[in-house]
Image (tube, helix red, strand yellow):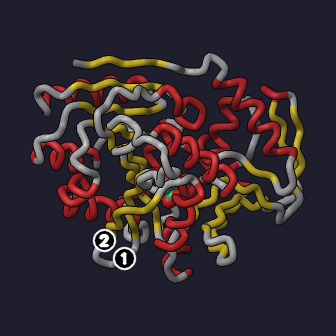
Amino acid sequence: MITLDVHLDAEASLTMARDVRRGLMTIPKEVSPKYFYDERGSRLFERITELDEYYPTRAEREILGGRSAEIVAVAGRPTELVELGSGSAAKTRHLLDAMRESGCLEAYVPVDISEEITQRTAEQLVEEYPGLAVRGLVCDFEHHLERIPDAGERRLIAFLGGTIGNLYPYQRRAFMCRIAALMFPGDHFLLGTDLIKDRARLEAAYDDAERVTAEFNKNVLAVLNRELDADFDLDAFEHIAVYDEAQERMDIRLRSLADQRVRLEGIDLEVEFAAGEELRTEISTKFTRERLEEVYAHAGLELCGWFTDAAGDYALSLARRPAQALPPGEPAPPA
Ligand code: AVJ
């Protein structure tokens, strides 16, 4: 009942080398947030999700816990749940439960970068959901979305957690178009997004009193030190989190506290930081319903469901391919 399709890039470390080199040579300097999540980074993120100031994880859990039955109904009782970035599938169970209760559940397709976690999750789920087929896909879904099997009758493709907020608009548009290209009539896309709110709450969520987010942010330098044999001094940088109202996103950076030179032995690169110079490590885009309607429309999709927590802090939205208007005289496609 379990199959696991592994498409891990043998060149992942080459990709990182190229990525980091490009990021450190551009102005302003940046590194991708995907390098936050080594073991320590993942543990720090877990702690972030439990902070008083960081509401998105709790808000998403509230929505999934309370409204999964409705989501499944609006999505047309999907037979298959495809989850991008499934991890341990902690929140997924709400959706799987709702699908089971409505009698439509047949398959779960977790898509994740970690083979170990995906295998473990698959084994647990076939025990918890007798008869469930699990077809896991281990890959970096930024690069291998097209490998997602299209066997399902009606699929719900879920991308939870608000990770889409990490993408720049041009990356987000490309990603959404590729999602749309995977969708057959009857398929739905379920997306988790944080919503625009007052600056004070947004900035507190990314600069908590316990300084866990600061540690999480600086951890990316520790990853570069280990993976690329670099000599970043974590104490020579300060955590910065500001809300950019014009761009509707949190802008998260590390500010150099002194003039300094850093050597990355592994990619034979030396970079200078002036005192006060900032290295961007992450953006986290915030949305409104109207903005999401635009995001979907650009990819040829339409918003067909909107679910928020009681406080209106976070949204799960459902999108589908609109019914195609046929040119006059054109026969209807086979059902
Ligand atoms: C996992 C990308 C959704 O943007 O809120 C949390 C990551 N960074 N605190 C977010 C994060 C700093 C988080 N996402």
Q: Are marks 2 and 1 in contact (CB under 8 Å)?
A: yes
Residue 175 versus residue 52 in the image, above or below = above
Is residue 305 rendered to the left or right of residue 165? Answer: left
The C terminus appears in which quarter of the rendering? top left
Residue 78 quadrant: top left
**Alpha-carbon neighbours of circle 1 within 10 Å: few (<14), some, or many (≥20)?**
few
Any part of residue 46 in sight: no
Quadrant location of the N terminus?
Answer: top left
* Relative horizontal placement of residue 21, taking residue 158 as reference (left or right): right
Please, is residue 67 above or below residue 53 in the view? above
Q: Distance between the residues labelled 2 and 1?
A: 5 Å
Q: To which residue does mark 1 refer?
A: 312
| Label 2 Cα neighbours within 10 Å, binned few <14 / some 14-19 / many ≥20 | some
Name the residue beneath numbered marker 2. 309
Identity of the amino acid at label 1? Gly
Residue lying at 27% horizontally and 26% vertically, measured from the top left: 134
Residue 124's x, y, as percent? 21, 29
Look at 87% across and 34% down and name the residue there: 269
